[in-house]
Image (cartoon, helix red, strand yellow):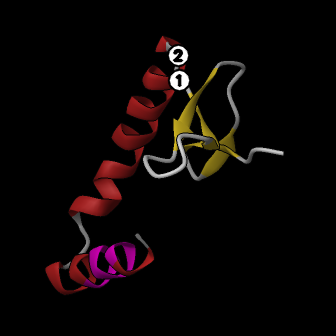
Amino acid sequence: MVHTIPLLINGEEKISSTTFPVDSPLSHTTIWSCSSASSADAEAAIAAASAAFPAWSKTKPVERRKILLKAADLF
């Protein structure tokens, strides 16, 4: 069974009804599928980002750095 990577919108995972395959360049087999974002998904992501911006803009640079470095570590 192939795992499907969800969208992450407003802190919630959502597997969309449409997906696309991600193939291994080595074996040429599908290793997972990714959810495809619709226009509504994109608009929801923009709305979530807009809602989060006031709090983020008040976050001190040191805290932002910690958050971004943690995201980089996870990535």
Label 1 secondary element: helix
Whether the magenta-drawn stretch holds residue 71 is answered as yes
Residue identifier under label 2: 38
Q: Residue at x 27, y 83 (%)?
A: 63
Quarter of the image for the N terminus: give it. top right
Query: Main SS type for the magenta part?
Result: helix
Label 2 secondary element: loop
Image: magenta residue range = 66-72
Give the quadrant of residue 6: top right
Looking at the image, the residue that sits furthest to the right is 1
> Badge 2, how many Cα within 10 Å: few under 14, some, many 20+?
few
Amino acid under label 1? Asp
Say above or below: 9 vs 35.
Answer: below
Give the quadrant of residue 2: top right
Image location (x, y in percent) of residue 73: 37, 81
- Tell me whether the residue at label 1 lies in contact with that at label 2, contact meaning CB atoms closer than 8 angstroms: yes
Say above or below: 53 vs 44.
Answer: below
> 9 left or right of 65?
right
Residue identifier under label 1: 41
Looking at the image, the residue that sits furthest to the front is 27
Say above or below: 37 vs 22.
Answer: above
Q: Residue at x 53, y 40 (%)?
A: 28
**Real-space CA distance between mark 1 and mark 2, rounded to the nearest whole angstrom:** 5 Å
Residue 38 vs residue 62, the one in the foreground: 38
> 46 left or right of 29?
left
